[in-house]
Image (tube, rainbow, N blue to C red):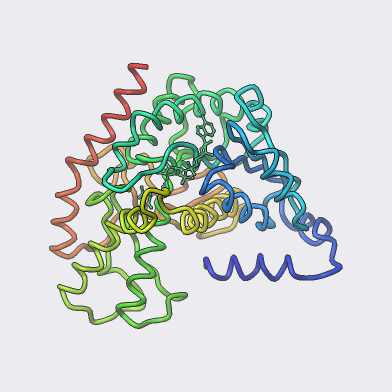
């Protein structure tokens, strides 16, 4: 599905002489997408990918600085959406007004030796202020939270929205798609199957052992040993750190994250537009376990989350992983809630 989305985007953009506006606007409703943190390492390629998405009619690119340039650049691409750049807090309201989907990759990334939780002190405040503005200017938008630590920033957003009286659990998503993207890539390599056909649910949260890929449910099936499954699980859990170390102080995953963020936003837009059976993993308010937020497969619809799907049959190894992740995930969730209520 992901590869076909990008192929269709590339195909559309390469039809020379076709009016992009005329080509797409007849079939897809008007949809505004806002990217907050659009001048950053993720924000720029993500803005590019959203500009390539024919489901988007307006693209608002917001950052504290640098967005006029990014917007001018991206706006020259001959696809459907109109692009506008907004810089500085005084323009945040305009960027958000009328947004159907708000994607948040704003905040600092990790350096080698740091955990995602080490970003909490800076990113919690950024996310809180952006969510306060969302509650004011586009309270019905679907919010795609990318800023780390996702296990805490999503609960912060929920508390901000609750305080503002706008919280709708169906509209708040922690973006965990990169874990799924990695699990699919690593599994395909080990199982020697066509990566384009691979599906692997990844549940739990988005940090270390809280990332729990369910390789027993991977398709196409393959006869992997317990050791191979353990190695794949560990590599998926450490995927972010692998990139942080390779970048050696120059940040964390940006390009693969932009791809993953574009996949998830596309799924949200499809759901809003009434496309049936759109299912992605996401960190959402949940009853799947005793934890108040949990990542699992989610069916997306016209109001956001239509159904939070269960975990399915787990192996003993996966059951152990599930029990092991709960204390850390709960503590990150509680940390976010506490921060939002104290500040
Ligand atoms: N969910 C995931 O899977 C995932 C994957 C990769 C990175 N991340 C996280 O995404 C975040 C961004 O990463 P990056 O590599 O793009 O970082 P970056 O530093 O390259 O870009 C961040 C951008 O956010 C902007 N920003 C800071 N404060 C802001 C504010 N108040 N309002 C609007 N914009 C603001 C900065 O100006 C910058 O342009 C980090 O927290 C990182 O850990 C999450
Ligand atoms: O690892 C990070 O800090 C960034 C992101 O969460 C990732 O998984 O790549």
- Left or right: residue 2 compared with residue 157: right
- Residue 107, compared with residue 240, is above or below; it is above
Q: Residue at x 55, y 59 (%)?
A: 276
Q: Quadrant of the C terminus?
A: top left
- Residue 192, compared with residue 95, is above or below; it is below
Query: Where does residue 236 sit, x and y in percent of width and height?
Result: 30, 61
- Left or right: residue 135 compared with residue 160: right
Q: Residue at x 36, y 23 (%)?
A: 340
Query: Where does residue 317 sit, x and y in percent of width and height?
Result: 14, 63
The one nearer the camera, 304 or 143, is 143
Query: Where does residue 248 sit, x and y in percent of width and height?
Result: 36, 53
Residue 141 falls in image quadrant? top right
Residue 27 falls in image quadrant? bottom right
- Residue 211, compared with residue 166, is above or below; it is below
- Left or right: residue 276 compared with residue 90: left
The one nearer the camera, 84 or 204, is 84
Q: Residue at x 37, y 41 (%)?
A: 150
Q: Residue at x 43, y 36 (%)?
A: 169
């Amino acid at each position: 599905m992901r590869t076909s989305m990008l192929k269709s985007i590339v195909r559309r953009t390469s039809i020379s002489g076709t009016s992009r506006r005329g080509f797409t606007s007849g079939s897809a409703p008007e949809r505004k997408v806002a990217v907050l943190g659009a001048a950053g390492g993720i924000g720029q390629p993500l803005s590019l990918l959203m500009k390539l998405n024919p489901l988007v009619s307006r693209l608002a690119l917001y950052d504290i600085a640098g967005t006029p340039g990014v917007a001018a650049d991206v706006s020259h691409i001959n696809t459907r959406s109109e692009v506008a750049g907004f810089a500085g807090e005084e323009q945040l309201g305009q960027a958000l007004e009328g947004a159907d989907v708000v994607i948040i990759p704003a905040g600092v990334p990790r350096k080698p030796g740091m955990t995602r939780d080490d970003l909490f002190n800076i990113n919690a405040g950024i996310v809180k202020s952006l969510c306060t503005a969302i509650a004011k200017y586009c309270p019905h938008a679907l919010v795609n939270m990318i800023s780390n630590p996702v296990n805490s920033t999503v609960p912060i957003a929920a508390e901000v929205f609750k305080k503002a009286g706008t919280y709708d659990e169906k509209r708040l998503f922690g973006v965990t798609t990169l874990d799924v993207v990695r699990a699919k890539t690593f599994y395909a390599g080990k199982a020697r199957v066509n990566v384009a056909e691979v599906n692997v649910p990844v549940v739990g949260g988005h940090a270390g052992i809280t990332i729990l890929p369910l390789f027993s449910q991977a398709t196409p099936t393959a006869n992997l040993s317990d050791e191979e499954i353990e190695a794949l699980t560990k590599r998926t859990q450490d995927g972010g750190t692998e990139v942080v170390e390779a970048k050696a102080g120059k940040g964390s995953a940006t390009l693969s994250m932009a791809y993953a963020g574009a996949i998830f936003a596309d799924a949200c837009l499809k759901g809003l537009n009434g496309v049936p059976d759109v299912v992605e993993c996401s960190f959402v308010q949940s009853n799947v376990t005793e934890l108040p937020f949990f990542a699992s497969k989610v069916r997306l619809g016209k109001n956001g989350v239509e159904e939070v799907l269960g975990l399915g049959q787990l192996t003993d190894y996966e059951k152990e992983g599930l029990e092991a992740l709960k204390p850390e995930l709960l503590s990150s969730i509680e940390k976010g809630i506490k921060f939002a209520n104290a500040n």
